[in-house]
Image: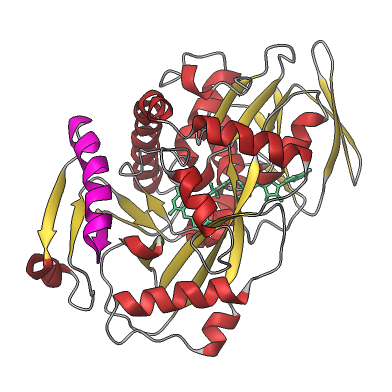
């Protein structure tokens, strides 16, 4: 049986492990953390075909510059004299174009729809016991500017086959009585989940079925040979047939070890949970705050901010306060205790310069496959990416075209 070693045990690594196991491979996942926190745990849990516009879109650079000096803004790019960041920022500004959106939207939607179908299949199979609901996604706005901005996305999404309703204030109040907004667009395509339940149940399933999950073990070097790959970790050496690099925001330095340029910056996001009843029934993006609200299993989550400032693990109080204050401006009677705000946590989204993931084999190193750069869509795209990784390694035709996802496009 061929051995596959996956570096990184976030949603992308675990989903890859799941489908590689189904293909009959002997799978080991190595992660430097305990796999109990980070982006794959704190995200908003959206499986969102509605998010077909990549982060690198027209207007994003201007928005970044506008917010650069506001430490409570939802999108923040910290100017730094760091070579990797400067190169990434240059590629990012080049990608913030209509051309990039036109060439990416269909590829992102195809991967999301594949992934959503697979989430449903995993749910139905009973392999992994988790919470998933399908109520769509509400994009709620308080200002005409936000409404007009979303109308452009709606126009494109309708053409691409999504079902979307416009809700006036009265209609919105029927769905979400506590929401304070002028109106909303209701994307019927989206589902939502509770990430930690999925992650924990998936780890359990994988281990029960023979996948080795090595935690607290950092991969230090990767040496590809003609037929095998040698990996050195903080705990020992491994010889394996295939390697999958699913190291999220740490992927650029991992790829450097192979002499490959894989531009990925960390986009830090925060979440606050409240166990108190909020009356919130539908996943909702509160547009002016750029924050995501999700009724999860037993609590409500408020997630937001995209802070491109390196792998900085400090929790900025002003950002947590900004998410809480914005949520309170959108929901009647919502209140966060100081304990809930103190427990706010964060994760790093792995952001590629054009907002499109890197999924595919390296050209020169035939036994190394890349799966990263999923930015704000990594949860939605997890199972779809995992399935494709398993198809690539099993030498099968991928379920969707991979042209747009080439890991060596930069
Ligand atoms: C606040 C917030 C809200 C979000 N909401 C959504 C949402 O609603 N829907 C959506 O689709 N996406 C959402 N996302 C994005 C999504 O969570 C991420 O894109 C996704 O979790 C990335 O998964 P990953 O497996 O690539 O990376 P990670 O989950 O970061 O996993 C990478 C793993 O690699 C390990 N690693 C790194 N280097 C090494 C090494 N050298 N050796 C061993 N292990 C290593 C790390 O320890 C880590 O566990 C959100 C993200 C945030 C932060």
Residue 61, placed above or below residue 107: below
Which residue is at the front of the view, 284 or 20? Answer: 284
Residue 8, placed above or below residue 5: below
Residue at (24% x, 41% y) in the render: 152
| Residue 121, image quadrant | top left
Indicate left or right for 162 with 21 as reference.
left
Quarter of the image that includes the N terminus: top right
The picture places residue 224, in percent across and down from the top left corner, at 82, 20
| Residue 370, image quadrant | top right
Residue 152 painted magenta: yes
Q: Tell me where the magenta segment starts and ends, as one range.
A: 139-160
| Residue 270, image quadrant | bottom right
Indicate left or right for 186 with 126 as reference.
left
Quarter of the image that includes the C terminus: top right
Residue at (25% x, 67% y) in the render: 142
Q: Magenta part mainly helix, strand or loop? A: helix
The picture places residue 248, in percent across and down from the top left corner, at 64, 43
Residue 103, placed above or below residue 209: above
Which residue is at the front of the view, 173 or 367? Answer: 173
Q: Is residue 140 visible?
A: yes
The picture places residue 200, in percent across and down from the top left corner, at 56, 58
Q: Is residue 200 visible?
A: no
The picture places residue 50, in percent across and down from the top left corner, at 30, 44
Residue at (16% x, 42% y) in the render: 163
Which residue is at the front of the view, 236 or 33? Answer: 33
Indicate left or right for 159 with 360 as reference.
left
Residue lying at the far left in this picture: please name it.
170
Residue 106, placed above or below residue 317: above
* Figure colour scheme: secondary structure
């Amino acid at each position: 049986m061929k051995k596959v070693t996956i570096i990184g045990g976030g949603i992308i690594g675990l989903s890859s492990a799941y489908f590689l196991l189904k293909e009959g491979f002997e799978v080991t996942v190595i992660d430097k953390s305990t796999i109990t926190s980070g982006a794959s745990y704190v995200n908003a849990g959206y499986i969102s075909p509605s998010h077909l516009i990549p982060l690198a879109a027209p207007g994003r650079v201007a928005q970044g510059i506008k917010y650069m000096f506001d430490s409570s803004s939802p999108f923040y790019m910290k100017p730094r004299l760091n070579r990797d960041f400067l190169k990434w920022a240059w590629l990012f500004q080049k990608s913030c174009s209509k051309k990039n959106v036109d060439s990416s939207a269909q590829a992102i939607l195809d991967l999301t729809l594949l992934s959503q179908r697979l989430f449903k299949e995993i749910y139905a199979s009973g392999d992994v016991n988790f919470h998933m609901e399908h109520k769509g996604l509400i994009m709620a706005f308080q200002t005409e500017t936000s409404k007009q901005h979303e109308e452009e996305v709606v126009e494109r999404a309708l053409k691409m086959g999504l079902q979307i309703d416009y809700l006036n204030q009265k209609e919105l109040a029927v769905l979400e009585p506590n929401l304070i907004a002028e109106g909303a667009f209701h994307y019927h395509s989206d589902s939502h989940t509770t990430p930690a339940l999925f992650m924990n149940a998936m780890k359990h399933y994988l281990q029960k079925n023979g996948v080795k999950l090595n935690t607290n073990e950092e991969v230090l070097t990767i040496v590809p040979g003609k037929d095998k790959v040698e990996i050195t970790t903080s705990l020992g050496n491994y010889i394996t047939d295939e390697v999958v690099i699913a190291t999220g925001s740490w992927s650029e330095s991992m790829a450097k070890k192979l002499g490959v340029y894989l531009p990925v910056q960390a986009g830090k996001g925060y979440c606050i949970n409240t166990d108190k009843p909020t009356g919130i029934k539908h996943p909702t993006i509160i547009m002016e705050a750029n924050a995501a609200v999700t009724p999860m299993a037993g609590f409500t989550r408020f997630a937001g901010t995209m802070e491109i400032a390196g792998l900085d693990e400090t929790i900025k109080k002003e950002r947590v306060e900004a998410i809480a204050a914005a949520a309170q401006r959108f929901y009647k009677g919502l209140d966060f205790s100081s304990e809930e705000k103190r427990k706010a946590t964060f994760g790093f989204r792995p952001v590629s310069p054009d907002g499109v993931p890197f999924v595919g084999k390296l050209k020169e190193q035939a036994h190394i496959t890349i799966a990263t750069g999923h930015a704000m869509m990594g949860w939605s795209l997890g199972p779809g990416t995992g399935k494709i990784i398993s198809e690539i390694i099993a030498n099968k035709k991928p379920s969707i075209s991979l042209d747009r996802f080439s890991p060596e496009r930069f």
